[in-house]
């Protein structure tokens, strides 16, 4: 492997670092039990996540004012609850369920891999999650970030160039000295277009056992690794 001039690694978070689908489904099931209802937690998690990109696109097009992900999530949740027989959740329960995204569990290799990478590199988030969400998630999941970069930091959602440019600028690094680590080819393509180095770590069950996208690298990424431990082996030892 040709050595890269990378000094900092920034990570996509939802799906790359944490398992949002089973984490949210677990919290949906718990909320349903409080009102004596059974529902399909995985289906609600999928539907909720399905509202994520369209909501951000409405912000990007100016159809909505700047709105953080917590608030986009809440609007989507309120719209979805009746479909899943959860309209009976009161305001406190809805607010708690909306914060499920603050309590996502990491993939099994995430924390150990990040800890190893932190020894050499600055590590941080580059996520569409808002700052409070990412900070609370880090506390919940023991994610050892040096820095939190959020769409909220730049008032723009990925793949807006301001997010990738902004992370490099705030670290006072050249784009090529920053590597985006992501499980999503489109995120990596947008980062690469701004001059960032790229690492693809597929999460083959992010969308469940029938996942059809992001199973393989679809670009000329600098590193492809099956998990964070292997990514650390590659970046720290060139193996």
Image (spheres, rainbow, N blue to C red):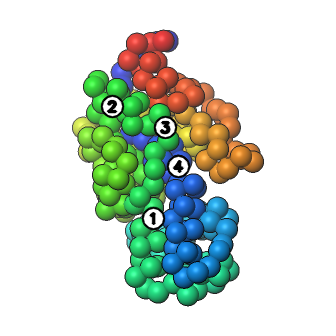
Q: Is residue 6 above or below residue 133?
A: above
Lower sequence index among marks 3 and 4: 4
Q: Mark 2 packing: few (<14 Cα in 10 Å), some, or many (20+)?
A: some
Q: CA distance from mark 1 to mark 2?
A: 24 Å
Q: CA distance from mark 3 to mark 1?
A: 19 Å
Lower sequence index among marks 3 and 2: 3
Q: Is residue 228 above or below residue 32?
A: above
Contact (Cβ within 8 Å) of mark 3 with mark 1: no
- The residue pinned by badge 1 equals 100
Lower sequence index among marks 4 and 2: 4
Foreground residue, 76 or 140? 140
Residue 143 in picture, x, y percent from top left: 34, 43
Contact (Cβ within 8 Å) of mark 3 with mark 4: no
Q: CA distance from mark 4 to mark 2?
A: 18 Å
Contact (Cβ within 8 Å) of mark 1 with mark 2: no
- The residue pinned by badge 2 equals 115
Lower sequence index among marks 3 and 1: 1
Residue 13 in picture, x, y percent from top left: 45, 48
Residue 21 in picture, x, y percent from top left: 58, 55
Q: CA distance from mark 1 to mark 4?
A: 12 Å
In the displayed structure, does residue 161 sit left or right of residue 77?
A: left
- The residue pinned by badge 4 equals 19
Task: Determine the secondary structure under disc 1.
Answer: helix
Q: CA distance from mark 3 to mark 2?
A: 13 Å
Residue ID at (46%, 18%): 234
- The residue pinned by badge 3 equals 108
Residue ID at (45%, 64%): 100
Contact (Cβ within 8 Å) of mark 4 with mark 2: no
């Amino acid at each position: 492997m040709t050595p890269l001039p990378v000094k900092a690694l920034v990570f996509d978070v939802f799906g790359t670092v944490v398992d949002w689908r089973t984490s949210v489904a677990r919290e949906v099931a718990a909320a349903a039990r409080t009102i004596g209802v059974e529902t399909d937690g995985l289906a609600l998690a999928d539907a909720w996540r399905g509202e994520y990109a369209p909501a951000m696109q409405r912000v990007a097009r100016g159809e909505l004012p700047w709105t953080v992900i917590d608030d986009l999530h809440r609007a989507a949740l309120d719209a979805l609850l009746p479909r899943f027989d959860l309209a009976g959740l009161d305001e406190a329960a809805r607010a708690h369920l909306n914060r499920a995204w603050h309590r996502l569990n990491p993939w099994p290799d995430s924390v150990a891999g990040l800890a190893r990478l932190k020894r050499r590199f600055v590590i941080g988030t580059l996520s569409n999650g808002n700052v409070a969400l990412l900070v609370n998630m880090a506390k919940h999941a023991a994610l050892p970030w040096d820095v939190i970069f959020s769409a909220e930091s730049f008032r723009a959602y990925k793949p807006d160039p301001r997010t990738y440019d902004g992370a490099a600028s705030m670290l006072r690094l050249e784009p090529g000295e920053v590597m985006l680590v992501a499980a999503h080819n489109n995120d990596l393509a947008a980062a690469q277009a701004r001059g960032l180095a790229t690492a693809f770590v597929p999460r083959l069950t992010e969308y469940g056992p029938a996942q059809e996208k992001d199973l393989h690298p679809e670009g000329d990424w600098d590193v492809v690794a099956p998990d964070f431990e292997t990514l650390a082996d590659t970046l720290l030892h060139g193996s």
